[in-house]
Amino acid sequence: MDFKTDFKPLTVDPDKIYDYSFAIIAEEMGPHNFSEDEWKIVRRIIHASADFELGRSVIIHPDAIRAGIEAIRKGRHVIADVQMIESGTGKKRFQKYGGDLHCYIADEDVTIEAKKQNTTRAIISMQKAVRENEGGIYAIGNAPTALLELIRLIKEGIAKPDLIIGMPVGFVSAAESKEELAKITEVPFITNVGRKGGSTVTVAALNAISLLADQV
């Protein structure tokens, strides 16, 4: 294939692109303290963001990987804070075990209740998610208020997720919500330090967990 440019890509083979990317990431990352399975998650986060600082800031609870794998294999659902996570996630790996991915933020009843309470749809969507799901994996990449509400529900004994992947991005409450997540002891989590994050890296972590779960 001729791109009609002076630069020629190293390869156009999709599998080789992944291999080359992961090799570059490993070389540029250098020494780190992540375990083998933790590194599989972190390198996908770096791959999705091209951000080594973000990758180095990832915090993985000691039970997070085991809990995520068990949740998927038990057919637990994945709950996303925003619809962007739905479009990037390999849902077939959840559906294979009987689970699925749900996002409630655009539901009409959520919108109505948020307006009634003069609060965010993200908060109300977490309340609905907890009512309708036992356990599950919560993937929060956009809304700090969703993460803070989920933490509140956990502390009040209302929610008991199997795993939280909480990596919201932003300037208002994003870093602080992740600090609060890193303090909890009731539920395993994957998060990072600071303002960086987002749906893309949350999906990357979620996909890495589901790939581990799908290994025979």
Image (cartoon, rainbow, N blue to C red):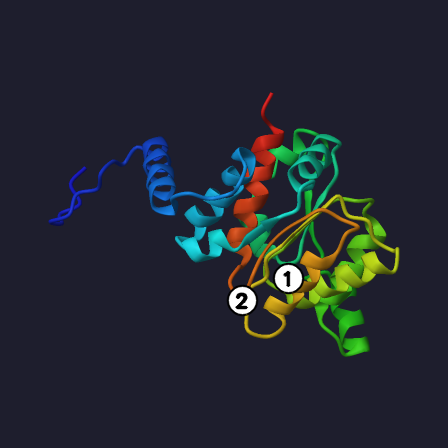
Name the residue that disc number 2 marks.
Answer: 195
Point 52% across, 46% down: residue: 204
Occupied quadrant, residue 83: bottom right
> Between residues 47 and 11, which one lies in front from this camera angle?
47
Instruction: Tell me if residue 46 comes above or below residue 177 in the rendering.
Output: above
Q: CA distance from mark 1 to mark 2?
A: 9 Å
Dot 1 amino acid type: Lys
Point 48% across, 52% down: residue: 56
Point 66% across, 65% down: residue: 177
Q: Secondary structure at mark 1?
A: helix
Residue 45 at x, y percent in the picture? 48, 48
> Between residues 60 and 163, which one lies in front from this camera angle?
60
Residue 59 at x, y percent in the picture? 59, 51
Residue 178 at least partly seen = yes
Dot 2 amino acid type: Arg
Q: Quadrant of the N terminus?
A: top left
Q: Residues within 10 Å of mark 1 (few under 14, many from 20)?
A: many
Viewed as shown, does residue 18 lie left or right of 170?
left
Tag shown at residue 178: 1
**Residue ranking furthest to the left:** 6
Q: Quadrant of the C terminus?
A: top right
Occupied quadrant, residue 122: bottom right
Residue 90 at least partly seen = no
Q: Residues within 10 Å of mark 2 (few under 14, many from 20)?
A: some
Marked residue nearer the N-terminal end (1 or 2): 1
Instruction: Tell me if residue 82 comes above or below residue 42 in the rendering.
Output: below
Viewed as shown, does residue 164 lie left or right of 13?
right
> Between residues 149 and 59, which one lies in front from this camera angle?
59
Point 71% across, 68% down: residue: 121
Residue 128 at x, y percent in the picture? 80, 58
Residue 196 at x, y percent in the picture? 51, 63
